[in-house]
Image (cartoon, rainbow, N blue to C red):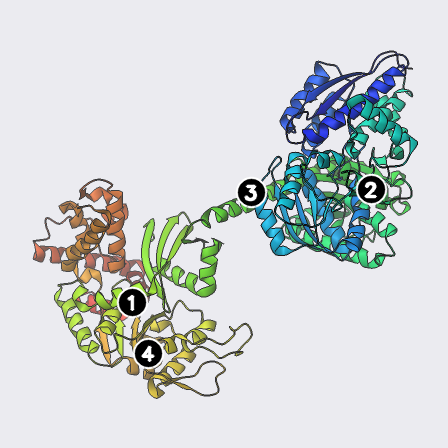
Amino acid sequence: MLKESIRIGFLFSLSGSTAVTERGQYQAAQLAIKQINKQGGVYGYPILSFVEDIVSDPLRTIEKAKKLIEQDKVHILIGTYTSACRKAILPLLEKQNVLLIYPTLYEGNEQNGWVFYSGALPNQQLQFFVPWITKNLGRDFYLVGSDYIFPKKTNQHMHKLVDVNSGKIVGESYRPLGNKNFEQIFIDIEHLQPDLIFSTLVGDSAIAFYEQLYQFGLNIPICSPITAETEIHAMKSITANNLYASFPYFKSIESEENRSFVRAYEKEYGSNVISSVMENSYNSIYLLYHALLKINQLHTDELREALAYSTFEAPQGFISFDHNNHHLWQQSRIGQVNDQRDFDIVWESEKPIAPLPFFSSMFKAHRQKYTNHINSQQMDISIVNKQLNTDKKEWKEYLPFIEKMAKLFPGDLLLFNNEGMLLKQFGTNELNTNIGSVWVFDEKGRNGFAEALISKHACIVEGHEHDDQTLHNYITIGVPMILEKNCIGVLGVVLGASNQIHLDAIVTMLELHRDLLVQLISEKKKISLFHDVIKQTMNHHEEGFLVLFKNEKIFGNDQAERLLNDVPFFIDAILRHLEEMNHTLSENHLRKRFGNKSFEIRLRKWNDFYFVYVKGLDTSKNIHIEKDQLSFQHIIGMEKGFLETVHIAKTAAVTDANVLIIGESGTGKELFANAIHNESARCKKPFIAINCGAIPKELIHSELFGYVDGAFTGSKKGGKKGLFAEANGGTIFLDEIGEMPLDLQVNLLRVLQEREINPIGASKPIPIDVRIIAATNKNLRDEIAYNGSFRSDLYYRLNVFQIELLPLRQRQADIPELVFHVLKKLNHKNNTNKRFSQQAMNILLQYHWPGNIRELNNVVERSYYLSGFQANIEADYIDAYIREQSEYPSASYVKEESTKIDVESVEKEQLLMHLNNTGYNISKVSRILGISRTTLYKKMRLYHINIKR
């Protein structure tokens, strides 16, 4: 028998967003204490209470709970309301060895030795509520809730229950605690037109939502497992008869115990507004009182044992704690709001419902109860298969790691999800377990896996300690996987009884590998979160954004993904450009046209990553610029050999003959092609540029010649016109013609001969009138003679006018003018007047420019921006690599002849170096220098270099 007063600590939000509910809980608990003390207390000693306002704040809850325990010396705590506040103090309860009675309905999936749960579980509300809703109100649900643990976990149950009851969830939204703005949700609801709203909003948010809903003009049923009389009476306006709730208790229950409770509360507080969680608080005090009558001293272990078997004839009916899981057996009821803003009971259970805190157990009970509504075997298959499919996707990337781990252990290694469902087994399967079987207490009795899931510690169950007789010859070991304080699953080992001697070593090794796996999962989740954050951030930009790593796309924002759908070979074109560009440059700018679409592209390099920014250009504006600007008068150059090339191109422009442009990458082949088109008779017609090397082989035929409707699986409805048809009457520019597959060369030859194209799937050819300008950085004669990769008959068809563009290292006299041209555009764009110093210009003159004009443009632009506010662009702002390569300083550009000699000397020395390094391998040297074999032979003859055999 107790010989001292018990000190109770209350943790309720007496202010804040959920105060409308929790204040009533506190008052109901105080009513019970007053009644007990009036009757003489506990063996003559009064119950003392201490209260702290936690304002729905988990951190404040910890602080206040610590104060109640350490300063006020309470023996037990009651309250916390939100799951976040309850979970926050669980470590403190264990550390201080103090019990908590939690008098609030919650989401389940918890069983803690320091907590007694006197509120309703999902199986005591939802498993009866959802079938009733689908039968009486409709099957299309819209879920809305406050953004914390209870609503989200509850709605996980709802997804499955709605599914197995042949319903559908058409929308789902969450708002922060205390939020009162729901306009967007109302717009969604009006658009989706669900049959009903399922609400898990709490406190002030719930009140605001219901009031605004009817003001918005939506007269739609609302169902809730949390909105009770306290919230309804706090609303200024609400449409009666349209709100439904499920609780163990309603004030309208016809029993003497309830009438007595209601009268006492009204007398004490002057209000008859009573909710289910208020009754939970009232019941909690009496359950505690009956437990205190059974103990001799206020020790936590003794109090825990007494509470586990405590019972009470409550206002809702007879209730009792389940001694196995510390949850209450209690009633289940469904109520409908009446004109007095109370609930009329429209359905109730015949007897108290067993508490099933874990998700899988709820569905087991649901199947047993509702076999008339749906075949239980079908429900098993539906639930298990969907759960398995979902979890298998989540765990798929980690299975190789677990499989390697399994080889280190005797017996079988098993992977369970956070609900005890077996997802994968590695080993001989000596137990003959089934994937999808659930290993919680309610299904399999005591075992190491179930205990690990509940206790969140490593657990061992041996032989006859198992409830299931089939496990009596085995040892089951479970270790939980804890990520961010939540159990995400269990790793289990099944051993024969003979392995008992090695148990400690096996558990230690299992925990070690568990830690490695959890760390791997954590890192993956961080990467995934980083990916999502970056995507959300980059989606606010107009530009497309791609990240490439080792020639693979690892990220793309929405704009970039749309681009890749429209231009499937875009990345191939970028990768080819990266191969050609100077890899020492950190940034590169270019413009590319794919079909009739033009893009401005920025490339940035960081270690092995490339960041690609893409912005579409106005096509009509580009066409205007091409016609007015891209003529031969805008092509810069005074070098004698270059002027001869321009003369040939001008001659070609006034004819309708095909043109073959040969030159290294970056020498301006497309610029010449544009100029030829713009000064030809076809200048008013389309100019279509096609990069033959960028289009995948499997797409090139359809891209060039199109296809008809239904030509192949996945083709666009209505077919596709094709780029040749788009260019009809104008010019087709075939860049990198040397990369065109041989089989397509045959088709191109037919186009040139017959002047017609054959779209894929077409029954007859289509006449076409196009001029072909082709370009390549390869020696097509060598390709024909040595590699057999180009058709000689096609070569002679294309090679009516051959234009060979000089590399920039052979146009040194043009470098100052080209630099000035780029600077002029940058100065105009940024309203500056910068120029290169003489020393900087000398460095540019000495460099060999393997990337030609494209590389020069990039270097000038980079140096311009690096120079900041300086008027002179000094040598230090030029890329270090270029400065190092320019080892022979030039006095001045005006000394043209001496400079030319120096350049030739440098080129000869570099040529000899590459030849010696490759063992005079002509093919390798030509690839290194980016020139054809023919050009290389010419240079060797020019510098009197003999081939070594």
Q: In the rendering, at what x and y percent does residue 711 appear? A: 52, 79
User: Label 3, label 1: how many angstroms apart (C-alpha)?
Assistant: 46 Å
**First in residue order: circle 2 vs circle 3:** 2
Using the rendered view, name the quadrant where residue 499 is placed.
top right
Q: Are marks 3 and 1 in contact (CB under 8 Å)?
A: no
- Say whether marks 2 and 1 touch (CB < 8 Å): no
Query: From mark 3 to mark 4, how far is it between C-alphas?
Result: 55 Å
**Residue closer to the observer: 265 or 733:** 265
The N terminus sits in image quarter: top right
Q: Amino acid at mark 1?
A: Ile
Closest to the camera, between mark 2 and mark 1, is: 2
Residue for badge 3: 526
SS at badge 4:
helix
Quadrant showing the C terminus: bottom left
Q: Distance of mark 4 from mark 1, alpha carbons? A: 39 Å
Relative placement, left or right, of 518 versus 373 is left
Q: Which amino acid does the dot numbered 3 rest on?
A: Lys
**Is residue 117 at least partly visible in the picture?**
no
Residue at the spot 21% in from the left edge and 76% down from the top edge: 653
* Real-space CA distance between mark 4 and mark 2, rounded to the nearest whole angstrom: 94 Å
Q: Please name which of the two marks, 4 or 2, marks the residue nearer to the observer.
A: 2
Residue lying furthest front in this view?
339
Ranked by sequence position, the earlier of labels 3 and 1 is: 3
Instruction: Determine the secondary structure under disc 3.
Output: helix
Residue placed most toward the observer, 719 or 806: 719
Residue at mark 1: 623
